[in-house]
Amino acid sequence: SLPMQKTLGRYEIVTKLGEGGMASVYLGRDSKLARDVAIKVLPDWCRNDAANQQVFKKLLDIESAHHRLFSRSQTTHR
């Protein structure tokens, strides 16, 4: 959970959308791309665990690869 914080890097925190066992999710606004984003914030116990860090790094790598593939696909089909 974010303590009364209004920004997180280039993201403006708009409102909290929900909370589950692994994270809190916020609606945010990307100031660089000028679009809405979902921001997932992990609890301290999850962020500080080495095994969880490895799992989340793999998920980020997969997401990054998917994003590059999707972005490339969108530019070639226009």
Image: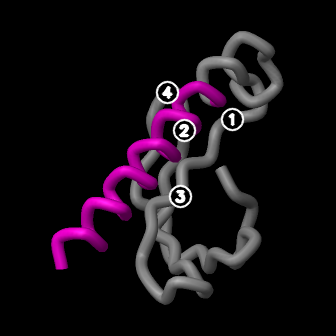
- The image quarter containing residue 32 is bottom right
Q: Amino acid at mark 4?
A: Gly
Mark 2 highlights which residue? 23
Packing grade of label 2 (10 A; few <14, some 14-19, many >=20) is some
Quadrant assignment for the C terminus: bottom left
Q: Amino acid at mark 1?
A: Pro
Establish if 21 lies above or below 61: above
Q: Residue at x 79, y 14 (%)?
A: 50
Cα–Cα gap, marks 2 and 1:
6 Å
Query: Can I make out residue 62 in this image?
Result: yes
Nearer-the-camera pick, 69 or 28: 69
Q: Which mark is residue 26?
A: none
Residue 36 on image: x %, y %:
42, 77
Q: Residue at x 45, y 61 (%)?
A: 38
Q: Label 4's element?
A: loop
Nearer-the-camera pick, 71 or 3: 71
Q: Earlier in the sequence, mark 2 or mark 1?
A: 2
* Comparing labels 1 and 3, the label whose residue is closer to the camera: 3
Pointers 1 and 3 in contact (C-beta within 8 Å): no
Q: Residue at x 27, y 60 (%)?
A: 73
Q: Earlier in the sequence, mark 3 or mark 2?
A: 2
Q: Label 1's element?
A: loop
Query: Can I make out residue 5 in this image?
Result: no
Establish if 60 lies above or below 33: above
